[in-house]
């Protein structure tokens, strides 16, 4: 079976889905998929519209059905779907009813193994039932923590004769390996729908699965824990707070000079207003590339200045964040070192030694622990808890890619309001 490229249109609005479908068909897409978010947003009308527009293309409706198998399969098939997707975690009766309905209305059934623990056992059961396709699917949320479909595919392909579709963060750099491992259908979403040039991106992926060769992608890859510093340098603090559901931004903490992109792990310090002993001691304790984050409770007597900055810079630290005051501004702005603070003041206190280093603190109304990731730019400072840093880095990259795609659509003659259909998605009250 010649490998098939299925383009997943996991979008919110039909006009964007249709535009991307048009460009992906130009690029060589074999199958088009009305993704689950698109179906939930636009209903069966988008399935009808896609089939009317591309009658010769195989159209997949990713219903993710888990109940009423016959009814939902009939609904999708009558709207124009050639392949209907149901979930493997459904009860056997739901899948059997979906198979009967698909056969009755001239469609085929793809069963998605997402969420199934023993995929080999379930695949054998599904094969006996008579499904047409299996789908190994690593969901977007799983992708953000580094999961890929390749290992599952390698083991599953040995235990079934059903054609296998594979989805989960696939791009032109990974598609060839998926085909080599035995996939019959390569499902690609974001690597096409978020691309600046959809036609080009589709063509590259199609070429990679036919020739079974890696082709470098223009989009960001998924980063593992060893590459987080690099990943955070690629995104802005607004990208990160969007990825964290509008959380993580320090309130009232601003850069004393614009133009820096600060990234590093935190070494925390707690002190009192005017007591600069512990912040200075922290410079000697800090490792190269770390960021000292100081909780002064918002005090307006300076605990940091030019000499401390020289010491931190020469130590190789990545920056300083102070929920308090700094001084010597005229010198600090000349030193090319990232400094973020709440206040600027001429007055300095004395080194009394109160406080501690390395404890959990509050800075800009955000909890910070030593080892958490700190990112600062002209918009402010965000803190990313170390235990979710890999996920947030990848989600922030995803946010940036979505924004890049929307920017291209605006440049092509739209406006932000028309591209995202802002009035349609305003929350309805009353």
Image (cartoon, rainbow, N blue to C red):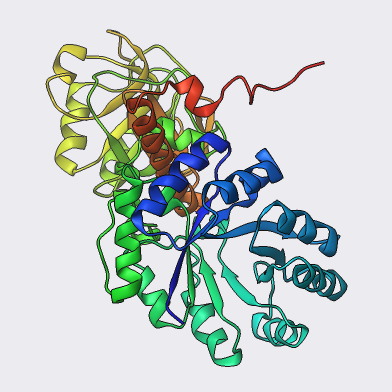
Q: Position of residue 152 (x, y in %)?
A: 54, 78
Identify the residue at image location x=50%, y=45%.
385
| Residue in front for this viewpoint, 171 or 329 | 171
Check the image and report above or below for 408 versus 218: above
Report the number of discs: 0
| Residue in front for this viewpoint, 62 or 226 | 62
Q: Quadrant of residue 89?
A: bottom right
**Which quarter shows the C terminus?**
top right
195 vs 288, left or right, is right
Identify the residue at image location x=29%, y=50%.
230
Q: Quadrant of residue 59?
A: bottom right
| Residue in front for this viewpoint, 29 or 244 | 29
Q: Position of residue 91 (x, y in %)?
A: 84, 71
- Is there any visible trace of residue 103 in the rendered image? yes
Check the image and report above or below for 301 versus 43: above
Identify the residue at image location x=48%, y=27%.
419
Check the image and report above or below for 239 versus 194: above
Q: Position of residue 179 (x, y in %)?
A: 41, 77
């Amino acid at each position: 079976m010649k490998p098939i490229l299925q383009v997943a249109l996991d979008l919110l609005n039909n006009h964007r889905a249709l535009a991307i479908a048009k460009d992906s068909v130009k690029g060589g897409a074999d199958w088009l998929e009305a993704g689950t978010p698109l179906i939930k947003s636009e209903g069966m009308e988008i399935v009808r519209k896609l089939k009317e527009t591309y009658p010769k293309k195989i159209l997949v409706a990713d219903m993710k059905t888990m109940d009423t198998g016959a009814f939902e399969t009939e609904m999708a098939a009558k709207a124009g779907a050639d392949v209907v997707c149901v979930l493997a975690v459904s009860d056997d009766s739901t899948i059997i009813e979906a198979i009967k309905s698909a056969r009755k209305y001239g469609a085929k059934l793809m069963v998605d193994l997402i969420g199934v623990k023993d995929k080999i056992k379930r695949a054998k059961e599904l094969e006996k039932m008579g499904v047409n396709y299996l789908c190994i699917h690593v969901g977007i949320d799983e992708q953000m923590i580094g999961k890929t479909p390749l290992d599952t595919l390698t083991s599953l392909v040995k235990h079934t004769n059903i054609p296998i579709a594979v989805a989960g963060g696939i791009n032109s750099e990974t598609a060839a390996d998926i085909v080599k491992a035995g996939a019959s259908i390569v499902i690609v979403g974001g690597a096409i729908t978020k691309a600046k040039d959809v036609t080009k991106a589709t063509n590259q992926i199609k070429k990679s699965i036919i020739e079974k060769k890696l082709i470098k992608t223009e989009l960001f890859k998924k980063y593992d824990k060893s590459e987080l510093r690099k990943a955070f340098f690629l995104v802005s603090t607004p990208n990160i707070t969007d990825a964290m559901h509008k959380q993580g931004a320090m309130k009232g903490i601003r850069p004393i000079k614009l133009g820096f992109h600060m990234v590093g792990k935190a070494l925390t310090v707690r002190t009192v207003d005017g007591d600069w002993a512990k912040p200075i001691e922290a410079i000697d304790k800090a490792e190269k590339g770390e960021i000292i984050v100081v909780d002064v409770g918002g005090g307006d007597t300076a605990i940091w200045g030019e000499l401390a900055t020289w010491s931190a810079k020469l130590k190789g630290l990545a920056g300083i964040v102070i929920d308090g005051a700094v001084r010597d501004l005229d010198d600090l702005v000349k030193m090319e070192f990232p400094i973020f603070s709440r206040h600027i003041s001429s007055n300095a206190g004395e080194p009394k030694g109160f406080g501690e280093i390395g404890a959990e603190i509050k800075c800009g109304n955000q909890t910070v622990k030593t080892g958490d990731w700190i990112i600062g730019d002209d918009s402010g400072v965000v803190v990313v808890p170390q235990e979710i840093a890999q996920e947030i880095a990848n989600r922030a990259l995803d946010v940036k890619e979505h924004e890049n795609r929307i920017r291209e659509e605006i440049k092509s003659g739209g406006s932000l309001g028309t591209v995202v259909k802002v009035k349609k998605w305003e929350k309805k009250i009353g």
